[in-house]
Image: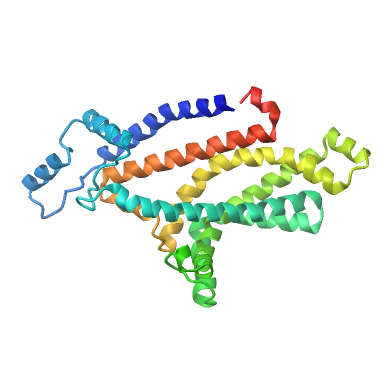
Amino acid sequence: MAQVIIRRLLWFIPVFFLVTGITFVTMHSLPGGPFDKEKTPPALVEQMEAIYGLDRPLPEQYITWLGNVVRLRFGPSLAFRGQPVENYLLPGLAVSAQLGLLAMAFALLVGLPAGIIAALKHGTWLDHGATFIAILGVSIPALILGPLLYWIFGLELGWLPVAKWASLSDGLVPYIRHAMLPAITLGAGVSAIIARLTRASLLQVLHEDYIRAAHAKGLHPWVVTTRHALRNALIPIVTFLGPITAIVLTGSLVVEQIFAIPGMGRYFVTSISSRDYPMVMAIVVIYSVIIVGANLAVDISYVFLDPRSRDTT
């Protein structure tokens, strides 16, 4: 287990340099700069670039940025002058993380039971209904589903708030009411994919010889399904949860804009247009760490679900 963790952490080092290096060069290659305004004198622009070190060669700027990251500092924001990037990102990260966790919880609570029921009731109207809903969920992107839920449940029915974000300190009910629509929007597509994966995987496992042997021993069908079939059927779903974290995180950028949620998404969008290099690089680093952490958690879960993989992981 320790070797798996160390190996995955070592892989993060080249991934970190590749992702941050490409992002750094790309951002600085875009036309325009953070201080380029129509009425700003060129002399003032040069002075501001000298203050923030933007007049230095790119390799020197990148090395300076790496030195700050090692000390867990992302530098001053170029859009919010004089303020460290962390002052804005940390509160937004907390909101985005809550939204991502709620969306994944919704996806698992809906997708897993739907896939299990569809597999156990294979060929019935329950199977066809669950499959149709799953295809529908995959086909409708968050960009369409969000405004649709916004219009139906927020504007027409007036059941749920359509904007902003409540904290737990405001009460559990207001918190859930504000989080419900964005979490469903973000998790609907993921739940549909999980349902289809669970159905396909469980159907394959149910036809294995050891499942027939378990039935022949007289074990209760519920025991065979939950103890023997479901455990092995979950392996591809757990493997899928690591990469899907990236989809949930990047999808949250759109959902946060639709529902005016104060997460990291709004900073990511505005920082690109305003050429706020430190803000963009900080968000890229945070997303990279979260994705690597999610994949590491998947690898560890995989070892527990399938002990045979300890020798090959």
Whole-percent x and y of residue 91?
37, 54
Q: Nearer the viewer, residue 120 or 133?
A: 120
Q: Is residue 277 above or below residue 260?
A: above
Whole-percent x and y of residue 229?
78, 41
Quadrant of the snapshot with the N terminus: top right
Q: Is residue 188 above or below residue 62?
A: below
Q: Is residue 56 above or below residue 116?
A: above
Q: Is residue 182 above or below residue 210?
A: below
Whole-percent x and y of residue 196?
68, 48
In the displayed structure image, the side of residue 140 where residue 36 appears, left or right: left
In this rendering, does residue 230 appear at all? yes
Q: Nearer the viewer, residue 264 or 120?
A: 264
**Could you tell me which residue is drawn at 52 percent across and 40 percent down?**
294
Q: Quadrant of residue 64?
A: top left
Whole-percent x and y of residue 109?
65, 55
**Could you tell me which residue is drawn at 58 percent across and 42 percent down?**
241
State how many labels appear. Answer: 0
